[in-house]
Image: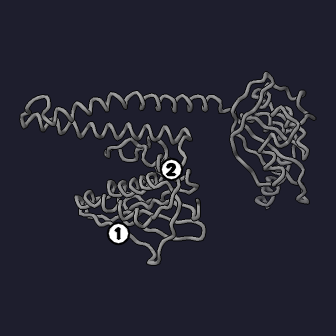
Amino acid sequence: MDNENQNNDQSSHGASLLSSPHIYTMIVNNLPIGFTLVDKDGIILEFNPAAEILTGFSKDEVIGKSHFKIIHGSKDPNSCPLFTHVFEKHAPSIATETVLKTKSGKAISLVVIAFPLFDTARSFIGGAELFRDISEFKRLEKERKNLLSMFAHDMKNPVVAAGGFLTRLRSGKAGPLTEKQKEYLAVTTRAFANLQRLITDFLEFSRLEGKEYKPVLSPYNLEEAVYRQIEMMKIEADKKSMLIAFEYAQENLPVVYADAAMIDRVISNLINNSIKYTNVGGMVTIRITTRDEDILVEVLDTGIGIHDEDIPCVFDAFCRVNRDVEGSGLGLSIAKAIIEAHHGTISVESTPGKGSRFWFTLPKNSS
């Protein structure tokens, strides 16, 4: 009986908590992010203190006013893509970035989550919006991109010039070289080649991240492309006594439209990484599967794998899961940008100690 009474008391307290207007007000007023509630016509019904700080408008100034006019400076609902999406399509929720116009006229960048509201009869009655200022983040992101681009461009010319002088020295044009000098120059040249690759990656990443890259589409034969990359990778695989297998349906694969140089780069990067992170005697398998809407390309290995905590950052710029391996940490980030520019997807699954499966898709008939 005591337990039953205790459960009844808890249920009673829970119901009281959920139905209390005071609790609702406390929650809304203490949210560290902006919150606004609107009716089905976009008229503001609720506006919390965080929203007042972000927008510069007081609650009294906006209650009963059009959300579109106050926040977007327009009476037109179409000026707010979030509410066009949520109100008209009644999607469960949407998260996106948008620009808000403050009372002073200043434009600030927001990340917004908006969702529709329905009554018990499932009739649409309005919507709610949660928003947070990300202007500082966007400013720092822009500065980082500019810094990266300037660094890569400023480094390129002196590196090219220095590389030219190294080539002249090795050719003996500055005079005969001793065997020891040749040995030192060979080491320097290899290190210089690595530096040039890093700078090329920086430039490529800067171009892709700045959305400057547009794929130059043409018919692309995936089967031939994979065979070419395998042939180029065999030397490295043989050094580690590794096998590379290629699996695909015997019937002819459909030709997709893609930027050949860029997709070659993606395939090369994935195969190279698999070889790099697989121990001696291991195996790499490349598999192509034709599906209804797209072509699936998988690169599987029996390598060291990736820990669960590292998976979320694998495609982030400068992510280095294994610090013992040389590289810029940009390869997979560049691969992701290339695949997304082709309207495809790229992802990874991995088990530490057993291996990884990287895969990407390319849409059919994307000409």
Q: 128 or 273: nearer the eye?
A: 273
Q: Quadrant of residue 2?
A: bottom right
Side (left or right) of 248 relative to 8: left
Question: As rendered, which of 212 and 91 lies closer to the eye?
Answer: 212
Residue 263 image label:
none
Q: Quadrant of residue 239?
A: bottom left
* The one of 219 and 1 positioned closer to us in this rendering: 219
Residue 24 as seen in the image, left or right of residue 150: right
Q: In the rendered image, which quarter contains the N terminus?
A: bottom right
Dot 1 amino acid type:
Ala
Residue at left 42%, top 47%?
331
Left or right of residue 140, residue 83 in this image: right
Q: Residue at x 73, y 37 (%)?
A: 131
Residue 183 image offset from top left, x and y in percent: 12, 38
- The reply to whether dot 1 and dot 2 touch (C-beta < 8 Å) is no
Q: Which one is earlier in the sequence, the residue at label 1 or at label 2?
A: 1
In the rendered image, which quarter contains the C terminus? bottom right
Give the answer, above or below, for where 357 lies relative to 160.
Answer: below
**Residue 207 at x, y percent in the picture:** 50, 39
In the image, is 236 to the left or to the right of 323? left
Is label 1 or label 2 in front? 2
Element carrying mark 1 = strand
* Distance between mark 1 and mark 2 Cα atoms: 25 Å
Disc 1 marks which residue? 245
In the image, what residue type sits under mark 2?
Ile
Q: Residues within 10 Å of mark 1 (few under 14, many from 20)?
A: few
Secondary structure category for the residue under label 2: helix
Q: Position of residue 197 (x, y in %)?
A: 34, 41
Where in the figure is residue 222, as x and y percent of width and height?
45, 64
Identify the mark at residue 338; answer none if there is no mark: 2
Extreme residue in the right direction: 64
